Amino acid sequence: MRRRDESEGSSIQVSSDLLEWLWDSAACPILDELGFRETPARTPTHKWPRIWWIPTGLMSRLPLHAAGRHYATSSETVLDRVVSSYSPSIKALIYARRNTMQKDLSHASKTTLLVSMRTTPQHPDPKVPKPGDLRFAEEEIQILGNLLSSSTSKAKKLEEPCKGDVLGSIDTCTIFHFAGHGISDPLDPSKSCLLLNDWVGNPLTVEDLTELKLYRKSPWLAYLSACSTGESQAENLQDEAMHLVSACQLAGFPHVVGSLWKVDDECSADAAREVYEAVRDKGWSNEAVALGVHNAARFLRRKTGGGGWRAGPGDVLTDVDGDNERGEVAAPVYGKGGGSGQNRGLGYARREEGNPSIWPAYIHVGP
C-alpha cells in the first residue's frame, strides 16, 4: 500500500521546531490578543479558558493545540494556557452546540459501545511479523468499562467484530469507542476506514459513517482510538475536512475524539483513561470531553519527557518499523535514537523521550 511519504498529500513532519514556529507565527499572537497570557491559577475553583480552532487549507493538518516552547519551566505553550477544541466550520460548531443543548444526559439512561481489535486480520504491512497485534487495545476497553460503569446504565463490548456487528449497535449508543487500527486513504478520503474483522472485503469507511442518521437518537461522543482518524492527506480537499472524525460528526455525534497522525498503543490507552476520568468527574458536559483530551496531552507530555526536550544537532529523523501502532500511514519524526515503541500502525514513530509526535496526537472536535 502507498506510504504517506509517497502520496500526493505527504504528512507533516512533527518536531519541536515546528511547534515553536506555530507558536511564534500563529498561536501566541492569538492568545495574547484574547488575554490568555499565563497558566490559569491552580485553585480548587479555577476553570481553564477554552478556545476553538477552525483552521483551513494546510493549517488544518497542523497541531495548533500543541504550539509552543515546551521546556520544563515554560508557560509559552497553548497547552499551558487554554483548553483547545477544533471544528471544521463555525456552522458545524453552532449546530453541535444546539444539538447538545437539547439533551440533558445528567440523569438520562446512557449506553456505551466499546469495540476492540487486538488482532487485525491481514493487516496491510507485510514487513511486520505481527502487525495487527495491539496489546493495549483490549486493556483499554477493560479500563473504560470500569470507569463508565457508575455513570452509564449499560455497556456493550464487541471484541474483533465485523462491520455489520458495529453498525447494528452504533445507532443506539451514547458513546462509541473504537480501539484498533485505522487507515487514512491518501487518494480518496471517503475510503479511509476503521479496520474490523472483515475490513479487507467490507471496510467501515468514512462514506459508511456519513450515511448514518443518528440525529434523532442519543449519540454524544465518538472516540476513535486509532491512527490518523482526523487526518485528510488529499491536498485538493483540505478545506472539506473529509476524514473519520468529521464523518462521525456528520453522523450525529456532537463530540468526537480522534488523531492527527499515528498514535502509540500504550499511550492511546493512557489518553482514553484521562478523557473518561474527566467525563466521570466533571459530568456529561461539553467541557468534560475537551478537558479530558487536554489532560491527556499534558499527562503524556510529562510521561514522555516532552516538557523539557528539544531537538538538537545530534538528533535524526527516525523511520523504524515496529509492530504495535494503530494505523496504516505514518510521519517521520525527530527522535534521539535507541528507543522502543509500541504503536498502533506501521511502526514509524518511536516512543522516545519528548517525541513531539506522541503527546499531541489526539484532538477534540465539538462544542
Image (cartoon, rainbow, N blue to C red):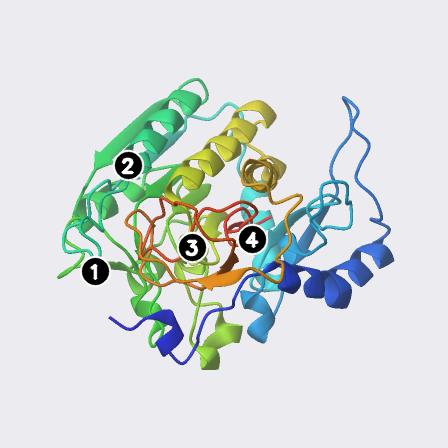
- What amino acid is found at the position of numbered circle 2 in the picture? Arg
Measured from the top left, where is residue 148 in percent x and y?
Answer: 42, 24
Q: From the viewer's perspective, is 244 left or right of 69?
A: left
**Dot 3, how many residues are within 10 Å of its Cα: few (below 14), some (14-19), or many (20+)?**
many
Measured from the top left, where is residue 52 in percent x and y?
Answer: 66, 54
Residue at the location (23% across, 43% down)? 133
Q: CA distance from mark 1 to mark 4?
A: 25 Å
Q: From the viewer's perspective, is 250 left or right of 22?
A: left
Q: CA distance from mark 3 to mark 2?
A: 17 Å
Q: Give the mark nearer the N terminus: 3 vs 2.
A: 2
Give SS at disc 2: helix
Compared with 175, 29 (above or below) is below
Q: CA distance from mark 4 to mark 3?
A: 10 Å
Q: CA distance from mark 1 to mark 3?
A: 16 Å
**Dot 1, how many residues are within 10 Å of its Cα: few (below 14), some (14-19), or many (20+)?**
few
Residue at label 2?
Answer: 135
Q: Are marks 1 and 3 in contact (CB under 8 Å)?
A: no
Q: Nearer the viewer, residue 123 or 258?
A: 123
Q: Give the mark nearer the N terminus: 1 vs 3.
A: 1
Residue at label 1?
Answer: 127
Residue at label 4?
Answer: 356
Residue that sits furthest to the front in the current view: 314
Residue at the location (57% across, 47% down)? 354
- What amino acid is found at the position of numbered circle 3 in the picture? Ala
Q: CA distance from mark 2 to mark 4?
A: 23 Å
- What amino acid is found at the position of numbered circle 4 in the picture? Pro
Give SS at disc 4: loop
Q: Give the mark nearer the N terminus: 2 vs 1.
A: 1
Measured from the top left, where is residue 302 in percent x and y?
Answer: 60, 37
Give SS at disc 1: loop
Residue at the location (31% across, 52% down)? 322
Residue at label 3?
Answer: 349
